[in-house]
Structure formats: structure tokens, C-alpha cells
Amino acid sequence: MIQVKICGITNKKEIEYLNILKPEYIGFVFAKSKRQVTGEKAKELCSNLDENIKKVGVFKDNSIDEILDVLGNVDLDVIQLHGKEDEDFINLLKKNMNKSIKIWKAISIKDIKSMKKYIARNKQSVGNEKQGDYLIDNFLIDGDNPGSGEAFSLENINEYFGEDYETGYVNDCIFKQSNFFLAGGISAENVIERIAKANPSGVDVSSGVEIIDGDGNRTKSFEKMKSLIEKVRTIK
């Protein structure tokens, strides 16, 4: 089943909508953004959230202390990193947080080869099998400017997500087809087409399900989210 993440949640009305529509994930943005919220605000919103919906915290070049401060307020299931966070940063972050929290890394399609550096960092043999210790639990693939909400070409994306992609680790590859979320300009109008082209495990949507309210603010539309989620649910 293709999973859905609705990102950039900022208000109680959106939480009410999401409790009805039940995507697998929702995202709170803690980096500088027009959708940025504080840890305290996210905590308030989560108090009314369906417990079966997983919570993602979106960060971009935040310090480890800033991330840990948010975790002190919000019981996040996933930390999504959009900045220049390197292996050392991620290692240190993992040492200071609950091991049950997953880490996703957003990668621009133009920098997709950089994913190699997040593959297994420690190799050990267990019986006749090899096990890897991964820095990243999942990837989010976006356009040239991650977070912009702009669609991008998917022409070559499957070259990097397949059984034969050379990672440098024998029989140890997380670049298997469907092991990433697809972002970038996704809406109800194009979600089926983009899933068919990229074959992701999930989609990450924000601006594509928004409207401008009476005060000129961007807010999530119940009808747009409903239409997108229903279309994704038809995919077998």
C-alpha cells in the first residue's frame, strides 16, 4: 500500500480533517518556513490527533539541541532532515534520542548519488548473513529545491532504486524499488501518474492540498486532501 504524508500542519482545523481522512503520517515543520510551528504548538495540536497517525518533525540545519528541545515537547515518530546534516551529525543525534524514532533524509533529485554515504556504516556477519547498521531509515526524494512544492522530472529516478544499483556493499542495498517517499508538486491531479512513474513507498504532500483562506493564509483543504488520499487508496 502506498502511504500518504500530509506535511506542514499548523492548526486545529487541519487536525480535525486529518482525524477523519487518516493518512499514515503528518508533518510539522520546525525549520524556517511559512508553515513553521514551535514545539509547544505541535504538542497542543498532537493532543487532539488520532493516535494511529504517525508524527514527523521536519528540520533543516537545526542544531541537535533544537531537535532535542522539540522532542521534549512532542513524541515524534520520525525526524525528517532537509539540510546539510552529515553522517557525524546524524550519528550524534541518534546517540541522544530514543532509538525507536526513525530518521528520514530528504535528497534533491539532482544530488541523488549522495545517498550512498548514508548506507551501512558498520558491517558484521551473523552466521552466513551480513547485517548493516543504517544511518537513514528512509529517503524522501524531492526536486532541485526541496520543500518548494515544485514538480520535477522523474525520467531517470528508477535507475537509482533497484536491485542492481551498485552501492559498494554485496547483497546489502536499501536502494530497492519502493524504499522512498516522493515529494515535489504532488496533488490529486497528478498523484496517480507520479506514483506510476516513480514507484515510491509513499508520497509527501503539502502545497498541493492547500487553499488560500479568507485572511490570505495557506491552509489545508479537506476536499483536496480527501481527493488525493482516495486516489492513492485505489492503487493496489
Image (cartoon, grey):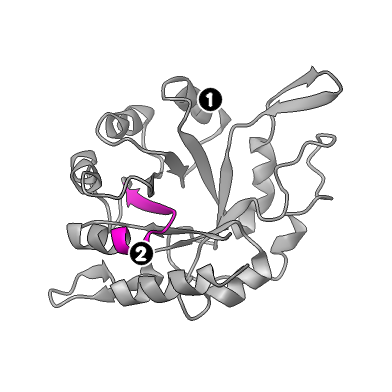
Please give the name of the residue rendered at 43% of the width and 67% of the height, measured from the top-left corner. 149
Q: Residues within 10 Å of mark 2 (few under 14, many from 20)?
A: some
Read off the magenta span.
19-29
**Any magenta on residue 22?**
yes
Secondary structure under the numbered disc 1 in the rendered image: helix
Query: Is 96 or 224 nearer to us in this picture?
Result: 224
Q: Observer-nearest residue: 233 or 228?
A: 233
Of tags 2 and 1, the one toward the viewer is: 2
Residue 193 in view of the camera: yes
| Kind of residue sitting beneath label 2 | Leu
What residue does disc 1 label? 91
Provide the secondary structure element on which disc 2 rests. Answer: helix
Q: Position of residue 172 (x, y in %)?
A: 78, 36
Q: Position of residue 61 (x, y in %)?
A: 41, 40
Please tell me which residue is depicted at 42% across the width and 25% down the height of the picture. 98
Residue 21: image tag: 2
Q: Is residue 154 visible?
A: no
The amino acid pointed to by label 1 is Asn
Image height of 1 relative to 125, above or below: below
**Residue 5: assigned label:** none
